[in-house]
Amino acid sequence: MSTDTHRATAAAILPLVGGPDNIGSIAHCMTRLRIGLHDRSLVDDEALRALPAVLGVVEDDTYQIVLGPGVVARVSPEFEALVAQARRAAGTTPVTAEELAERGEALKAAQKARNATPVKLALRRIANVFVPLIPALIGCGIIAGLNGLLTNTGWLPAVVPALAAIASGFMSLIAVFVGFNTAKEFGGTPVLGGAVAAIIVFPGVAKIDAFGHHLAPGQGGVLGALAAALLAVQVEKGCRTWVPEALDSLVTPTLTVLVAGLATLFGLMFVAGAVASAIGAFATWLLQSGGALAGLVLGGLFLPLVMLGLHQALIPIHTTLIEQSGHTVLLPILAMAGAGQVGAALAVYCRLPRNRSIRTTIKSALPAGLLGVGEPLIYGVSLPLGRPFVTACVGGAAGGAFVGLCHQLGIAFGSTAIGPSGWALFPLLDGSSGMGLTVAVYGGGLAVGYLVGFAATYFFGFTRRMLTDLNSDPGSIPATGQQASEPAMA
């Protein structure tokens, strides 16, 4: 799309969310434009959903407009520019945090009461540490895959060392980035979090004898970095309460790095290393022993986990597995949930030939669904209808069982990065059985998910009453289930 198209999309969205005066904050993630609103009642949901570029809307702690990967990164700055231009023309200044709190306190309180459970908030904050790392994981993962292809084929041998350095450099220091982001997220000084986490990857830790054991550089990985930075934040906050202001710039950072650093070397690295090793061993055992059953459970339950917001707990697990072995074996299985969702949506399309609204939604959202962006199909089709959401899970379970069975038979593989899913995961696949067999198994899993999701939905996704009502009424489907947490691989 051209810049004019993205600007036109932003211009079309702005009046439908209440205009510039109704905007409190603007942000975006991989697929969604996130808007903080002063008055929710000014939003025209139906008109927004009708825009060609809008794949769906989700209401969470912010109002989220699903535009899809790539598009949202181009529409968001245009939207911000339009809001700023309108405010300058009106002679107004951006709304302060205090004004926003006063004008939207009732709405925020109601919204947080529904979504801000302690578990979800904790998982969301941990996810906020890792989500900014996803673009680098994707880029380095694809380069690592390309490097593996060149190595196996013997092409361009002079380029292989350079690609290896490019692909591995980020992963060798990922603990530092995790520490930096952790301190930033939890209210500490980011560089102090990064400094403490850097201890974990420093080669010199191999000379330290702690309790009769020598440490290994990288021991504890991202989990150790997360714990070390969290401790550094607490030490720093504690220092701020008693260190005199005149000495704060000297004493606080010194004590923060010293106390958290010693605790990291003589405690956290051992504990986090044991936990990380256990995660890797459990994932390997689960798929080698449980195979099809494990895949069935993982693939079938991932969509419900997404709806509960609990999928965010998997992000540090994926990252730990990538750090340990170069890929996460769980992601290709979990990606089968998206395949079941696509199959279910196709069945809905076939079963409701006279419902233009639903069929239009499916046609516009299906390409994104094939690439692993599932929100439009989930929130716009299967979840509001109810039964098709369950049959989509059945398709995901079947695809997961297929991939899990192949793992059990010795065809083990995973994804070198997190974020992409569906067809977009093909360039990130990495396995010990050769790229051809790896691609074939993953593609076979997608096909099983599509077919079973379609069949389960076609034959069991509707009651007679549902078919009668939905085919006789071309209007939009019920709006239940529109509020849910965002998936990690969006």
Image (cartoon, grey):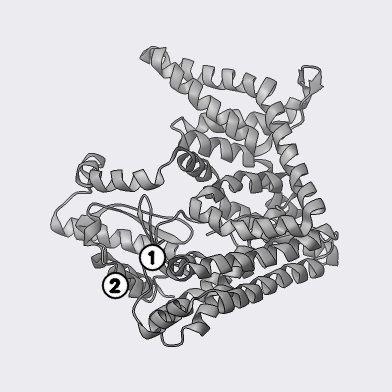
Q: Given the current orientation, which residue lies at the most extreme bottom position?
A: 354
Quick check: 163 above or below 266?
Answer: below
Rendered residue at 53%/25% (across/down): 232
Quick check: 372 above or below 59?
Answer: below
The reply, left or right, for residue 127 in relation to residue 169 is left
Amino acid at the residue labelled 2: Ala
Q: Is residue 319 visible?
A: yes
Q: How far is mark 1 from mark 2, CA to CA? A: 18 Å
Amino acid at the residue labelled 1: Val
Q: Can residue 141 be seen in this view?
A: no
101 or 147: nearer the eye?
101
The picture places residue 461, in percent across and down from the top left corner, at: 53, 74
Quick check: 293 above or below 50?
Answer: above
Label 2 crowding class (10 Å Cα cut-off): few <14, some 14-19, many 20+? few
The picture places residue 401, in percent across and down from the top left corner, at: 72, 63
Residue 223, numbered label:
none
83 or 17: nearer the eye?
17
Comparing labels 1 and 2, the label whose residue is closer to the camera:
2
Rendered residue at 65%/28% (across/down): 199
Quadrant for residue 80, please give it. bottom left
**Element under disc 2:** helix
Task: Look at mark 1 in the image and give the residue it sits on.
Answer: 75
Quadrant for residue 8, please give it. bottom left
Residue 47, numbered label:
2
Rendered residue at 32%/62% (across/down): 79
The picture places residue 156, in percent across and down from the top left corner, at: 80, 65
**Element under disc 1:** helix
State how many labels appear.
2
Quadrant occupied by the N terminus:
bottom left
